[in-house]
């Protein structure tokens, strides 16, 4: 596909030869923005809770509303990418995310903040799956691992800065800036993609959008997450909790039935017949589960139990993400050369062991015991993350990259929202951070066994 630069492209120096690198830069920033939002907000939550007079459960909804909506709509974002194309969808989603971030910074109570976080989740779900799919289309298959590694390196650079930036803004400036910093970043994403990308000609008919699938997926997930989140506060035997649990299961059952009957479903269940794809989705789910417990509940632990300030807690958590921007690109190249399986399994095994280390170390409430575990945990996770994205991408046909990315993103975000729900409930009911980290270790171990059985280099 030839690229004819206009005056804006010439001003930025975008040509047909370097266009894919501009796309990689913009999409890396887009992915980084989501990762930054996770780590920045997690560090700021204790201060936001005090400033707006929230209960512990309500403050956790500030994080989980965003993740729940993101998880429910990410598959829709992947499908919309296949329908509308990247050039329309990414700037539109980035604009929605940026406007919601602007309003969130002005929130004067939990209702406004949670509502704007809902809109943020929709914006992120619209554009992020499309950015990952765009990278796989812009680069040939033999360079895909390298490109995804660079994509991850840019994005995780933002994530690595998140705890420090969140702590600095919260303690020195204002927690409101953890939302306002998103505005110029989203503007840059929309500008670069709008200038540098032109969608290739469509092959075949335009896919239809599955409205019924979206409603049942979002409704079922919403009921289940609400029940798990509130059960610790209201009690598991309360009629409303039991009704939400039963209703969530029933609505998700309807979703599966609907998807199996659609010619062009929101979520192509047939993709899960590919063992490598299913295993990668499970790893993404569990990876986000453990990351959210470390970043969000780790920040709470450092501030509530060890008495750290937001800035000090941000500095302390840097060890957990320090390896991502340094190792993501090299790991991507190694996965191109040697295959995904050894890195996924080895990295995940190390991360699981270190999560157990952190859980045990909380017995003594000593950061100098916890810190080394955070560093090695993050290093193990980075060796798993990039190869998993590569294996999932290679398992999906080119014309379904948007759908595959959307499903993968849904699995990742669902892991985060389930992680917040389960950990929040455990914290309210047991007041023990150690129980949170031990339960996460159990999830990781089960995932390790399943990944060992299902991921093979042959299936890539």
Image (cartoon, helix red, strand yellow):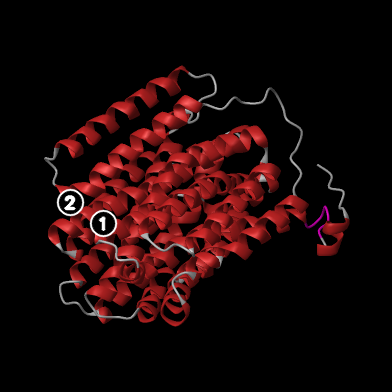
Q: Quadrant of residue 375?
A: bottom left
Question: Magenta segment range?
Answer: 14-18
Q: Where is residue 60 in the image (x, y as percent from the top left)?
A: 31, 58
Picture residue at 74% right of the left edge, 48% below the top: 197
Q: Is residue 282 magenta?
A: no
Q: Which residue does the image show at 42% across and 75% down from the upper left?
A: 170
**The one of 428 and 268 positioned closer to us in this rendering:** 428
Viewer can see residue 221: yes
Quadrant of the image containing the N terminus? top right
- Number of marks present in the image shown: 2
Q: Mark 2 points at which residue?
A: 232
Q: Please state the horizontal and vertical placement of residue 431, each as a whole percent of the image.
A: 15, 63
Question: Looking at the image, is 325 positioned above or below residue 346?
Answer: below
Cα–Cα gap, marks 1 and 2: 9 Å
Residue that badge 1 annotates: 57
- The answer to whether residue 342 is seen in the rendering is no
Looking at the image, which residue is at 28% across and 75% down? 303
| In contact (CB < 8 Å): disc 1 and disc 2 | yes
Q: In this view, does 334 lie to the left or right of 54?
A: right
Relative placement, left or right, of 441 versus 83 is: left
Residue furthest to the left in view is 237
């Amino acid at each position: 596909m030839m690229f004819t630069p206009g005056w804006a492209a010439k001003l930025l120096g975008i040509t047909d030869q370097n266009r894919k690198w501009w796309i990689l830069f913009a999409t890396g920033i887009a992915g980084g923005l989501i990762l930054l939002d996770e780590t920045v907000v997690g560090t700021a939550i204790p201060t936001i809770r005090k400033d707006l007079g929230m209960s512990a459960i309500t403050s956790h909804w500030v994080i989980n509303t965003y993740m729940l909506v993101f998880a429910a709509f990410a598959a829709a974002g992947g499908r919309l990418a296949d329908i509308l194309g990247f050039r329309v969808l990414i700037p539109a989603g980035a604009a929605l995310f940026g406007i919601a971030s602007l309003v969130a910074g002005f929130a004067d109570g939990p209702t406004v903040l949670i509502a704007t976080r809902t809109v943020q989740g929709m914006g992120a779900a619209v554009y992020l799956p499309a950015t990952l799919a765009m990278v796989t289309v812009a680069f040939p298959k033999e360079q895909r691992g390298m490109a995804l590694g660079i994509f991850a390196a840019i994005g995780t650079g933002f994530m690595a800065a998140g705890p420090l930036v969140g702590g600095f803004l919260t303690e020195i400036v204002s927690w409101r800036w953890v939302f306002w910093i998103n505005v110029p970043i989203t503007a840059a994403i929309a500008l670069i993609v709008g200038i540098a990308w032109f969608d290739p000609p469509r092959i075949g008919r335009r896919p239809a959008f599955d409205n019924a699938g979206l409603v049942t997926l979002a409704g079922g997930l919403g009921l289940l997450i609400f029940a798990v989140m509130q059960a610790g506060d209201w009690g598991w035997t309360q009629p409303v909790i039991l009704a939400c649990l039963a209703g969530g299961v029933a609505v998700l059952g309807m979703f599966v039935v609907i998807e199996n009957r659609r010619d062009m479903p929101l979520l192509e269940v047939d993709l899960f017949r590919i063992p490598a794809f299913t295993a990668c989705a499970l790893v993404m789910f569990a990876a986000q589960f453990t990351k959210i417990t470390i970043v969000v509940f780790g920040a709470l632990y450092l501030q509530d139990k060890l008495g750290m300030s937001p800035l000090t807690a941000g500095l302390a958590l840097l060890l957990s993400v320090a390896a991502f921007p340094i190792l993501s690109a090299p790991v991507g190249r190694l996965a191109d050369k040697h295959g995904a399986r050894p890195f996924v399994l080895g990295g995940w095994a190390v991360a699981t062991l270190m999560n157990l280390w952190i859980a045990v170390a909380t017995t003594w409430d000593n950061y100098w015991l916890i810190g080394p575990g955070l560093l090695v945990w993050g290093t193990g996770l980075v060796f798993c993350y990039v190869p998993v994205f590569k294996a999932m991408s290679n398992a999906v046909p080119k014309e379904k990259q948007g759908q595959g990315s959307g499903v993968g993103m849904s699995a990742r975000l669902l892991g985060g929202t389930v992680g917040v729900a389960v950990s929040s409930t455990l914290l309210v009911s047991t007041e023990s951070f150690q129980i949170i980290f031990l339960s996460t270790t159990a999830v990781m171990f089960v995932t390790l066994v399943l990944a060992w059985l299902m991921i093979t280099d042959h299936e890539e």
